[in-house]
Amino acid sequence: MGRAGYLGLGAVWLLALPFVAYAAAFGWRGLVADPGAESYLFDTGARGAEVALAAHMLAGALITALVPIQVLPVLRRRWPGLHRAAGRVIAGAAGMAALGGLAFIAVQGTIGGAVMDLGFGLYGALMLLAAVQAVRRARARDLAGHQIWALRLAVLAMASWAYRVHYGLWYALTGGLGSNEAFTGAFDRVQVFAFFLPYLLLVELWRLRRGAGAC
């Protein structure tokens, strides 16, 4: 990775910090109080669903903060033990984020209805799969397989932040065309898939271009 790559990752990390702080604070409040009053995205009700959402947000904050650092080649080269330990933390937190989000959807459902449930449910399932596979391939000493699954996991881990970025840019450019408070507008419908699937597609195109066989 060249200097531009390091600068890019540093910029992403700095830009993501406000989301990390928000998600961590939201998750913590959800464990000790009621997060529903402050959530513009979910219509909470059952306490179990709120706890699941809180776990999802806390774990999401952790992985968003760690992933840009974890993918640095210098960390893997100079401190492989730290890289492995951080990888376990990220995989575990990703699993908790995925399961927490899926549990919330199953119990409460999202404010956007069936389309949002489907999009976010698919996102959570893919994150859980990537976390499990990244660990499995690492334990099997399948370096190529581990790297591609870890990259998929990294992309999915940052997608929650990208979701907010997409909305911020869209509202800045269009004033919120095709979006509404119920998250049922045309842009909202697309966005529940567009915040992660295109990035995963780019990973697959990169893999195919390199001729990597791992899947």
Image (cartoon, helix red, strand yellow):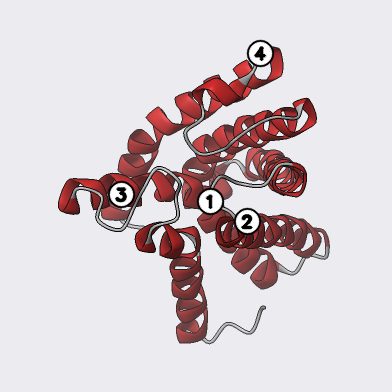
Question: Marks 1 and 2: which is nearer the front?
Answer: 1
Residue under label 2 = 117
Circle 4 residues within 10 Å: few <14, some 14–19, many ≥20? some
Q: Amino acid at mark 4?
A: Ala
Residue at left offset 66%, top offset 42%: 90
Q: CA distance from mark 1 to mark 2?
A: 7 Å
N-terminal-most mark, 4 or 1: 4
Q: Amino acid at mark 2?
A: Asp
Mark 3 falls on what kind of element?
helix
Residue under label 1 = 112
N-terminal-most mark, 3 or 2: 3
Question: Looking at the image, which is closer to me, 40 or 9?
Answer: 40
Question: Marks 3 and 2: which is nearer the front?
Answer: 2
N-terminal-most mark, 4 or 2: 4
Residue under label 3 = 8
Circle 1 residues within 10 Å: few <14, some 14–19, many ≥20? many
